[in-house]
Image (cartoon, rainbow, N blue to C red):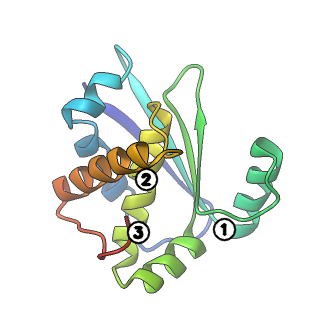
Amino acid sequence: MRLEVEVIKAVPVPIPPSFFRALLQRAASIPEVEARLPDGAAAVAIRLTGDDELRRLNRDYAGHDAATDVLSFAGAETLGDLAISWPAATRQAHEYGHPEKTELALLCVHGLLHLLGWDHVTAAQRKEMSRLTIAALARSGLMPAPGRL
């Protein structure tokens, strides 16, 4: 199963689209993740944007008038879309002490897991999402800073 990944840069981000494609394709090869992918073609669009757009999307679609780092939107014809705030990813990378690329990867994987039905409401759900996120990042040679997950 190959996951198609489209990357839209609404703001300048110094990381090439190929990084995001390879990251999510590797994440999709984890057995638990692959098992939840739809039969046939699956596609995800990633929109890298700013805090203002994430706040507007969060308000309009989730009813929360606050900026956030990543939002997931399930699709009808595709797996869905991710919107990620580059400024939030930059701030969080500095806060946790790992590279911006690692934080962006973490947010992408987090969003993909949401598109596939995982959530993090309970402690058990948070533990499982963290386990899968760490496994997916490891497939791309990335490790979040201690305390990030």
> How far apart are labels 3 and 2 at the CA level?
9 Å
Q: Nearer the viewer, residue 23 or 97?
A: 97
Split into 4 quadrants, where in the image is the N terminus? top left
Q: Secondary structure at mark 2?
A: helix
Tell me which label, 3 or 2, sits earlier in the chain. 3
Give the residue type that dot 3 points to. Answer: Glu
Of the numbered discs 3 and 1, the one sitting upstream in the chain is: 1
Where does label 3 land, which residue? 103
Alpha carbon of mark 1 to alpha carbon of mark 2: how far?
15 Å
* Contact? badges 1 and 2 (CB < 8 Å): no
**Front residue (pair 8, 66):** 66
Gap between marks 3 and 1, in whole Å? 15 Å
| Residue drawn at (41%, 81%) of the image | 96
Task: Decide if residue 89 is on the left or right side of residue 132.
Answer: right
Identity, as a three-letter code, of the amino acid under mark 1? Gly
How many C-alpha atoms fall within 10 Å of the one at disc 2: few (<14), some, or many (≥20)? many
**Residue 108: which disc?**
2
Instruction: Write the residue at 49% across / 45% down.
Output: 122
